[in-house]
Image (cartoon, helix red, strand yellow):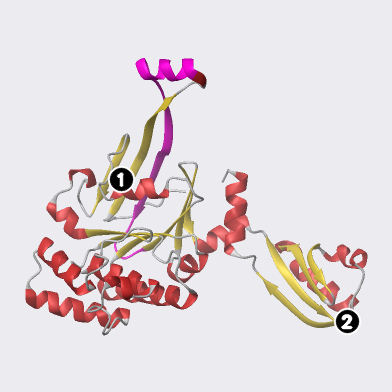
Amino acid sequence: MFYVRIMSIIIVENLSKFYPVAVKEPGIKGTITHFFRRTYCSIKAVEDISFEIAPGEIVGFLGPNGAGKTTTLKMLTGLIHPSSGKVRVAGHVPFRRQEAFLGAITLVMGQKQQLLWDLPALDSLRINAAVYNISDKDFQRRVGELTEMLSLGGKLTQPVRKLSLGERMKAELLAALLHHPHVLFLDEPTLGLDVNAQVGVRDFLREYNQRYQATVLLTSHYMADITALCQRVLLIHQGKLMYDGSLDGLLERFAPYREIYLELAQPLPIEKLMSYGDVQFMEGRAVRFMVPQEALTRTVSKILADLAVIDLTVTEPPVEEVIGRVFQAGVV
């Protein structure tokens, strides 16, 4: 599926990235040959992907490790040059690294840090302000505003090494957003954070998006980040774009079944329960079925008519399970 939007702020057309990798035969002979005459093979990181993102959208960018997510983000931010295809972000070609482009975007990587470890975060923020030519008046106003949004009061004057992991991540976000970028590329921004810190970062990103109409492309292995923030998702697998559409549409298309949780009045043998659906879990009086969506109403009615049920709940399968099935299948 390909989304077409008027006045898109991110436009990606047939984008590819291939890396030449030296190939060496094993043994001494292979080492000597490799030293004097190297042969190469081409490894694809991203292959012929296309999509567009409108201003103000928050889009989830999903894929397993090695799928090409970070490579794509690096091409969109101008860190690496694409092998082929076209990219425009905020009206600019990223790899030209023009000043106006750099002022319009930011890249936050959860496993990288820009704040100086032994200095208070405020000192690093002043360096960022100088880099982006932010006046003292604007600096004070923006730091105050973002500090309040991130609940970082009193933390910016402490050395970064004394902050908790969640506080450091929030401070990193503040540093990355000090110049008020229009486009945010976020690569695992909640990586390693506890549940409370993850919620805090999500709440901030939602508020920042609503307040400034910023566009966000978010990668995360925490599906709670995606379900909380993104209505649209891009799925990439082995360098190819597999799906571009709504999160609800993904669930509807690739999860044509529902889960039924039962609490029975008394335990029953699994042989008697298998006629109602695919039994996924059974412990004592608790049972979980997988039932095709088209058979859901009929199955629930039959269960209630045949069995002594204390409680019955129908749910959709977890989104991470659905996406895992998509990647395992490898086709869309």
In the image, residue 243 above or below residue 172: above
User: Callout 2, which amino acid?
Assistant: Ala
What is the magenta range?
Answer: 28-57
In the image, residue 154 above or below residue 34: below
Q: Residue 326, how many percent across, how many down?
A: 59, 50
Q: Residue furthest front?
A: 28
Q: Residue at x 64, y 68 (%)?
A: 316
Q: Residue 230, how many percent across, how many down?
A: 44, 65
Q: Residue 118, how many percent across, how many down?
A: 25, 68
**Residue 56 makes an appearance in the image:** yes
User: Callout 1, which amino acid?
Assistant: Met
Residue on which the image places disc 1 = 75
Q: At numbered mark 2, what does the secondary structure look like: helix, strand or loop?
A: loop
Q: At numbered mark 1, what does the secondary structure look like: helix, strand or loop?
A: helix
Q: Is residue 58 left or right of residue 280?
A: left
N-term mark: 1 or 2: 1
The numbered dot on residue 308 is 2
